[in-house]
Image (cartoon, grey):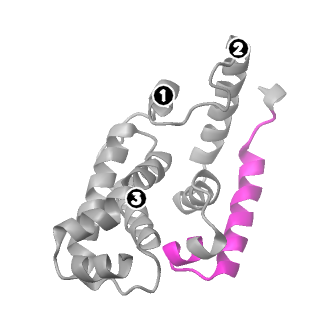
Amino acid sequence: MSETLIRKAKHGDADAFTALCAPLENMVYRHCLQLLGNPADAQDATQEAMLRAYRAMATFQGFSGVATWLYRIAHNVCLDFLKSPRTRRESASLEALQQTGFDPEDPNPTPEDAYLAQSERERLQSAVARLPDEQQALLSLRYGDGMSYDALAQTLGLNPGTVKSKLNRAKEKLKKLLPEPNAR
């Protein structure tokens, strides 16, 4: 069925494109939010990624899945945004992240647990924000979105061995940047 949708979408059928890509839009939004840190920017990037995908659908070769292809487009849109000279919006607040589905594991944490979880997230986000964009993206895709090494390799145009080594370097750098919780 998806092969039929792909064929129709490649020939300009907007309904087929929507059937293929609309179920992936939330995943793309979450990825953009993780990279950009602001819900409004993530929404803009998601819309831009979907528009670029629609315009480029005729060139889709099928070497990877539609989700991987769409992730790569969204990833590139976010990188373009991060490189642009326009002013970046403030990072998302915890409340904004929770509204988009990034809730703590326990839906009813105690105030102390909520504070500790928020503090730990902020500590991690602060350290990740100091990494180069490529390392932030790798960590976001692997651990935020749960992407496999093979899917990461396809998305980023790298071989799996390179992805593993770049992830290891990113994790090592993150460990160095991450202050001990009691050292603050």
The location of residue 106, given as percent across then percent down, is: 67, 27
The residue indicated by pointer 1 is 93
Name the residue at the front extreme.
1
Asked whether the beta carbons under mark 2 and mark 1 sit within 8 Å of each other, the answer is no
* Residue drawn at 73 percent across, 19 percent down: 113
Highlighted range, magenta: 152-180
Q: Which-is-in-front pick, marks 3 and 1?
A: 3
Classify the position of the N terminus by image quarter: bottom left
The Cα–Cα distance between marks 2 and 1, rounded to whole angstroms, is 19 Å
Badge number at residue 126: none
Q: Is residue 29 left or right of residue 105?
A: left
Vertical order, 176 against 151 (above or below):
above
Residue drawn at x 44%, y 68% as measured from the top left: 67
**Crowd class of label 3 (few under 14; some 14 to 19; many from 20; radius 10 Å):** some
* Residue type marked 2: Thr
Residue 12 x, y percent position in the rendering: 16, 77
Label 2 sits on a secondary structure element that is loop
The 10 Å Cα crowd at callout 2, few under 14, some 14 to 19, many 20 or more, is few
| Residue 160 painted magenta | yes
Q: Earlier in the sequence, mark 3 or mark 2?
A: 3
Quadrant location, the C terminus: top right
| Percent coordinates x, y for residue 66 in the rendering | 41, 73
Three-letter residue code for mark 1: Ser
Q: Is residue 118 magenta?
A: no
23 above or below 126? below
Residue placed under numbered mark 3 in the picture: 24
Residue identifier under label 2: 110
Mark 3 falls on what kind of element?
A: helix
> Can see residue 110?
yes
Residue count near mark 1 (Cα–Cα under 10 Å), binned few <14, some 14–19, many ≥20: few
Q: In screen coordinates, is 45 left or right of 27? A: left
Q: Can residue 83 be seen?
A: no
